[in-house]
Amino acid sequence: MSAIMSAEGGAKPLVPAISEEDREALIQAVRALEGPSFVGRLSSLAGRPVELLGRALPQPASEAVSRTTEAALKRALRYALRTIPKGSVDPETRVHRMLAALSGAMGGALGISAVLLELPISTTIMLRAIARIAQSEGEDLDDPETALACIQVFALGGRSGSEHLHESGYFAVRAALARSVTRALHQVAERGIIDESTSAVVRLLSQIGSRFGMVVSQKVAAQAVPVLGALGGAAVNTAFTDHFQTLAHGHFTVRRLERIYGKGTVRLAYNQIRASEGL
């Protein structure tokens, strides 16, 4: 039965109830998307707070991180999604985590300047991992909208940390990027391909890069300061990759449920779960 009668006698669509299995998946997604930041993960790894990470980078270093981050996103978007077999739904998260750890170890062994050289490699590896996760949740990697949804995951890691539900969090980031995503999709439709040099895609990557750069700055600082120096580049890069894989699992779980139940229903349930969890 697709409709019920309202009090006025008109047809009123039923709001689908989320199944217990899907509600549990949504709970895990909320915890992933609203849970500890990258700095929080590093604090746990190091056994002590490291909230100041990334705030004390010298201006030249911060500018270098900003430039390198956007370049890394462009390179990742250009290469990562084109090399994934379309028939496989195995996210291969362990493989990508190991590759990122190896990349980080190389960067750590060669010093901080090498970390910036290594970033495009690790970003491409992470985008491949994100795309595999998307694929495992039923996304079509041939769809440009899916490709842009994959790259958006990098914006989810730079949350503001606001305690106010409507000022921060997953849906706030999606809303902030929505107009740029729409414009980028229009340009993709006109050209038939995702061209990272078009104005709309450049603007979207700039928005994402500004948030991703916050986490990259924390990563660069983590590989330089004594409190985490003993962990090495491999450990920091593993945490870095795991952080974004966790976000990707949450993001594409939400998108899968939106395809089943509708965006409004999922967002209402998401906000209820977030409030009940105190996130």
Image: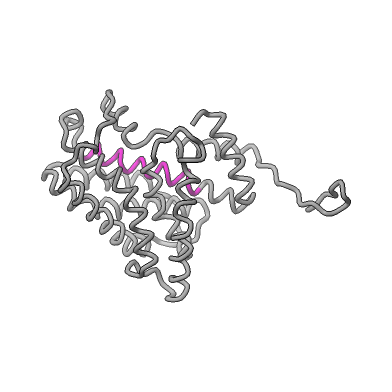
In the rendered image, the vertical position of residue 128 relative to residue 228, given as above or below: below
Q: Which residue is located at x 34 percent, y 66 percent? A: 196
Where residue 213 sits in the image (x, y, percent)? 29, 48
Question: Would you say 150 lies left or right of 58 here?
Answer: right
Q: Residue furthest left?
A: 110
Q: Which residue is located at x 26 percent, y 27 percent? A: 46
Asked which quadrant contains residue 33, the reply is: top left
Where residue 272 sits in the image (x, y, percent)? 59, 35
Frontmost residue, 5 versus 254: 5
Q: Is residue 110 magenta?
A: no
Frontmost residue, 76 versus 140: 76
Magenta: main secondary structure equals helix
Q: Which residue is located at x 18 percent, y 36 percent? A: 232
Specify start and end residues of the magenta stretch as a single range: 233-252
Question: Would you say 153 lies left or right of 240 here?
Answer: right
Frontmost residue, 30 versus 241: 30
Question: Would you say 158 lies left or right of 236 here?
Answer: right
Q: Does the magenta stretch include residue 250?
A: yes
